Amino acid sequence: MILDPVGIVLQIATIGCSLVSTKLLTKRTTERWGYLIMFLSLPVWMALEVYYAEWVYFCLNPLYVYLYYKAFKEHWKETNMPLTRKGKKIMAAMVGEYGPEKGKKVFYASQNKGTIEDTHKKSRYQRSK
């Protein structure tokens, strides 16, 4: 097999996307971005498969699209976890005191600092500490 410039560029792009998404998938905080990059890199994979006439792999792409989309959608929703009753009460108090935008910032800053806890409902994907 002789590698030509187009094939080399496509292979470098697919390797780059794979490495970046794998790195992002190793951390829980950046996991959703890994799925997004893999989902958006599928056209590059498809182009590579068509270019080298690897039709068996090309026929598997609908399955990849479905699986990456499902994983991306599930992990993207996780960041919008609903507030518990306690969280709603604290959020309302902070919004009332600081205003809508600053109140949310203060609420999430307090939560990240550890001043307030148990403000969000547990996700089924959330790991125990």
Image: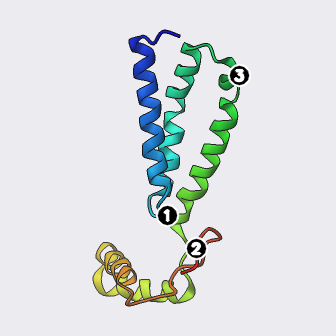
- Looking at the rendered structure, the kind of residue marked 1 is Arg
In this view, the residue in front, 55 or 103, is 55
Q: Secondary structure at mark 3?
A: helix
Q: Residue 53 falls in which quadrant of the image?
A: top right
Marks 3 & 1, CB-CB < 8 Å contact? no
Local packing at callout 1 (Cα closer than 10 Å; few below 14, some 14-19, many 20+) is few
The residue carrying mark 2 is 127
Q: Residue at x 42, y 45 (%)?
A: 20
Q: Amino acid at mark 3?
A: Val
Amino acid under disc 2: Arg
Q: Is residue 24 above or below residue 99?
A: above
| Residue 17 position within the rendered picture, expressed as x and y whole percent measured from the top left | 45, 38
Seen at 71% across and 22% down, the residue is: 56
Task: Point out which mark residue 28 bears.
Answer: 1
Residue at disc 2, secondary structure? loop
**Mark 3 or 1 closer to N-term?**
1
Q: Nearer the viewer, residue 43 or 96?
A: 43
Pointer 3 residue: 56
Q: From the viewer's perspective, is residue 75 above or below residue 11?
A: below
Residue farthest front in this picture: 1
Q: Determine the CA span between mark 2 and mark 1.
A: 9 Å
The residues bearing labels 3 and 1 have C-alpha atoms spaced at a distance of 33 Å
